[in-house]
Image (cartoon, rainbow, N blue to C red):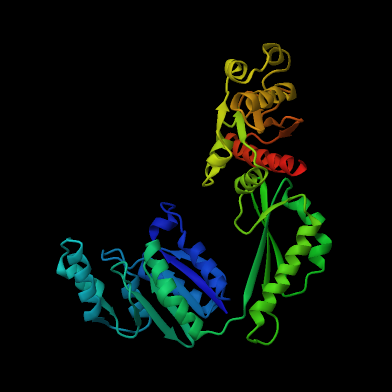
Amino acid sequence: MTAHLLTVGDEILIGQIVDTNSSWMSRQLNLQGIRVTGKSSVADTREAIIKGVEQAMASAPIVLITGGLGPTKDDVTKTTLCDLFESPLVLHQEVYDRIEGYFRKIGRGVPLDSIRHQAMLPEKALILANKVGTASGMWFERDGKVVVSMPGVPFEMEYLMTNEVLPRLKERFVSRPIVHRTLQTAGEGESNIARRLEAFEDALPEHIKLAYLPTLGQVRLRLTGVWPGELIPEAEALLQQELDAKKAELLAVIPDLVFGEEEDTLQETVGKLLRQQGKQFGTAESCTGGYVAHLITLVPGSSDYFPGSIVSYSYEMKTRLLGVKPETLETFGAVSEETVREMAEGARKTLGVDVSLAISGIAGPGGGTPDKPVGTVWMAVSDAQRTEAVKIIFGRDRAKNIQLTGVYALNMVRRFLLED
C-alpha cells in the first residue's frame, strides 16, 4: 500500500518554515507497512490545492494533507475540499461545543463567529476529533481512495495521526509488512563503502534493498525488506528474523566502519565505551573551538566520564594551559603533528583524565599555505601508554570543516578505545 503526502502553505514554499510533518508521517506510515511514494507542497490557493490533491490521488490510494485549516481568510483548504468532493459545509454542534469549552477552560475569550467557522465542516467527510487544538481532521473517500486533511501544527497533526488516522488506515487497508534495519558508519565515503559491499549487495534477494544515506563524515546503511509471499500471521516476525540475519552479514563485511545501529550517534558510542572501561576523557581543541566537547555533552550523563575541555586557540594558551613547548610551536607551527601530540599529552595531565583528544587545524576560509592548505587538520589521541596522531585535509568551507573534524575525531577516539 502506498501514500502521497501533500503540504499546503506559502510559508513552506518560500522557506519560512521547514516541513517536519512529512518526515514524521513517513516514519509512522512505514511502521504500518505503508510506503510513501511521493511528497508535494502547494500554495494556499484553491487552484493549487485542487491540482495537488488530484495529482496525489492519481499516484496513490492514500493522500494525507497537512495545513491550511486555520480560522483566517488565507486558510482555504477546507472550503476547497468541499468543492472537490461536492460537499456542503454544515455546523457540527459537538465540535462547536468542544472548542467553546476549551477556550472557556483556559480563560480566553474568542469571537463566536470564529468558533462557528471552525465548527463548519464538510457534510460528506468523517470528522476526526482534534482534542489538542481547534481544527478538526477530515476523512474523505472516493473511488476506493482515502484523502485525509489535518492541521499543519505538528503536535495537532501527530495527535490526529496517532489516535485517528493510523488506526483507521490499518483497518481500511491490508498492507504487507515492511522492516528496516540500520547500521551507522564513519570513516569512509559512500563510494568506498559501496565498493566493499558490492558482493553483499549483489547477493541480496529481490525483496530486500540496501540504501546509502550519507551525511557529513558518516553514512547510514539501511536495509529494507518487504514481505514477498502470501500474507500470513507470522509474516512480520519472519521478515524481522531475515533482516536481522542480513544485518549481521553486513556488519561482518565492514566491522571496522560500523559504530552503531538505528539512531545511535558517535558521541553516544564513545560515551558507552568510556563508561564500560571506567575511563575519564577530556579534549583540547583549537580550530573546532569546543565543538567536540559540545557533541560529547549532548549525551545525558556525560559528566560521568567527561570532566571538561580546554579551548586553546592561541599559541599562549597552548603553552600556558597545555604545556606545549614554545620551540615546538616556533619550529613546526600550531598545525603540526608535533604540536598536536604535545597538546593531547598536556590535556591528559592538566585535566587529570585517562584519555585525551587534541585538535589543531586551519578551518578557513583563509590562513592556508602551500604546505598547509585550508582544511588541514591534525588530531591526536593519548593515554598513559601511547599517543596516536593523524592528519586529514578537508575542504575550504569553515563550518563543514569543523563538523567533519568533530565526526573524524570522535571516530578516532572510538577506534583508539577499542584497541585497548
Above/below status of 298 relative to 380? below
Residue under the point 15% across and 65% down: 111
Indicate left or right for 394 with 163 as reference: right
Residue under the point 73% across and 23% down: 370
Where is residue 108, by image quadrant? Answer: bottom left
Q: Which residue is at the front of the view, 216 or 320?
A: 320
Q: Quadrant of the N terminus?
A: bottom right
Above/below status of 206 relative to 282? below
Residue under the point 66% across and 24% down: 343
Q: Which residue is at the front of the view, 125 or 419?
A: 419
Number of dots carrying numbers: 0
Residue 286: % across, % down: 60, 27
Residue 144: % across, % down: 49, 87
Residue under the point 17% across and 64% down: 110
Residue 262: % across, % down: 62, 59
Where is residue 331, by image quadrant? Answer: top right
Q: Residue furthest right?
A: 199
Above/below status of 332 relative to 274? above
| Camera sees residue 361 | no
| Camera sees residue 241 | yes
Residue 346: % across, % down: 65, 23
